[in-house]
Amino acid sequence: MTMNQRNIVVIPGDGIGPEVTSAVQRVLESAGAAIDWIPHHAGLAALAEGSDVMPPETIEAIKEHGMALKGPCTTPVGKGFSSVNVQLRKKMNLYAAVRPVRSLPGIKTRFENVDLIIIRENTEGLYSGIENEVTPGVVMSMKVATEVACTRIARWAFRYATHRQRKGISVLHKANIMKLTDGLFIRCAQQIHKQEYPNIGYQEHIIDAGCMRLVQDPSQFDMLLLENLYGDVVSDLCAGLVGGLGVVPGANFGDEHAVFEAVHGSAPDIAGKNIANPLALLMSAVMMLNYIADRQGDAGAGKIATTVRDAYDRALEDGCKTRDLGGDLGTDAFADAIIERL
């Protein structure tokens, strides 16, 4: 069974981005993925070419081809340009961020058999970055929540839970303090659950208590639904349960388009040294192939996704690891180990 040929935008990103992206492309090609890559830039790579950090032509290309695979892009801390990721999600209306977190063979952590999916609203809340200086020395950040966006992400999460045959959704919030914004978020989730998906389990936890319970025993949870900032923090926390950001994928979905990305940073300190772990981006590419299979009915893409996932699981189980996981393989050597097991 073969995959239908298709064009997909690739954004290599900054720092280690080009290295891990190249490794992932090589694995997918070896697995038989029929992809014509359409290269575009964002972040510092785009600035170096004299363009904006989020060039209009990159946005237009994603709209034209429907999806993109994106490496990590640098975001300055406390100064400089605004986040490339935030700009991309807003301009493309990629309102649903999905991060599956599962235990992997050969990677020993404190917990076993972790299997979580974090769903994060991607366009509103404090994370949308609406800030201003009220007066010298006084700054303000605005948290925005709308019924449209809260309802939309709740419905998306319950639909995803049904499609993936998940058991239940837990909403993490701070509605005891932020009664209007977080209150609206949980009311919308309650309504969608009651009226449209009563067959899916539902519970709520105040965010701080929920985080405590996660690190005590993650098996208490199945899917987590959170507003923007909470989702960013908690998804990284959950990544720590299974080995870190180098072993979890990420995807951003809208109604018409999707961007699949490594969730870790650009790690400029190790760029060009052939030691970065390409697994997170490869796992994101597997999500992309499954999306193609589900959304476009391409069973061949789904078959390749399973083949690649089985190959990197076997590689890890056989002790093939990059340095961040306690091994000694470089970026290319780890990709080679996966290709040998396809």
Image (cartoon, helix red, strand yellow):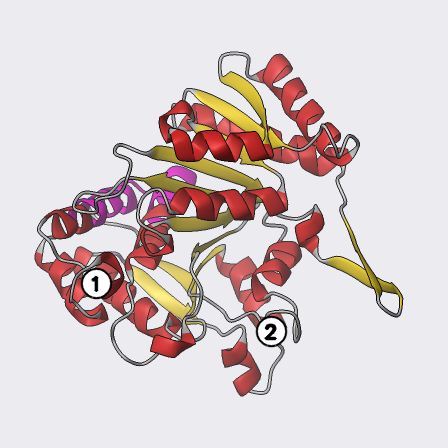
Q: Tell whether position 75 is magenta.
A: no
Query: Which amino acid, by three-letter code, is at mark 1?
Result: Thr
Q: Amino acid at mark 2?
A: Pro
Q: Is residue 29 left or right of residue 340?
A: right
Can I make out residue 255 in this image?
no
Could you give the CA–CA distance between mark 1 and mark 2, rounded to whole angstroms? 33 Å
Instruction: Give percent across and percent down for residue 259.
Output: 48, 55
Which residue lies under the disc numbered 2? 55
Query: In the image, is residue 327 above or below residue 108?
Result: below
Image coordinates for residue 71, horizontal then vertical, percent: 42, 65
- The stretch in magenta equals 289-311
Left or right of residue 237: residue 192: right
Q: Quadrant of residue 147?
A: top right
Q: Is residue 274 visible to us here? A: yes
**Label 1's element?**
loop
**Residue topped by disc 1:** 322
> Where 15 falls versus 201 (above or below)?
below
Estimate how packed mark 2 is, as few (under 14), some (14 to 19) or many (20 or more) residues with alpha carbons within 10 Å: some
- Residue 68: name its quadrant: bottom left
Question: Seen in the image, is 320 located left or right of residue 283?
Answer: left
Residue 230: x and y in percent read 59, 43
Disc 1 to disc 2: CB gap under 8 Å: no
Q: Residue at x 62, y 47 (%)?
A: 229
Q: Which residue is at 59% across, 34% downward? A: 207
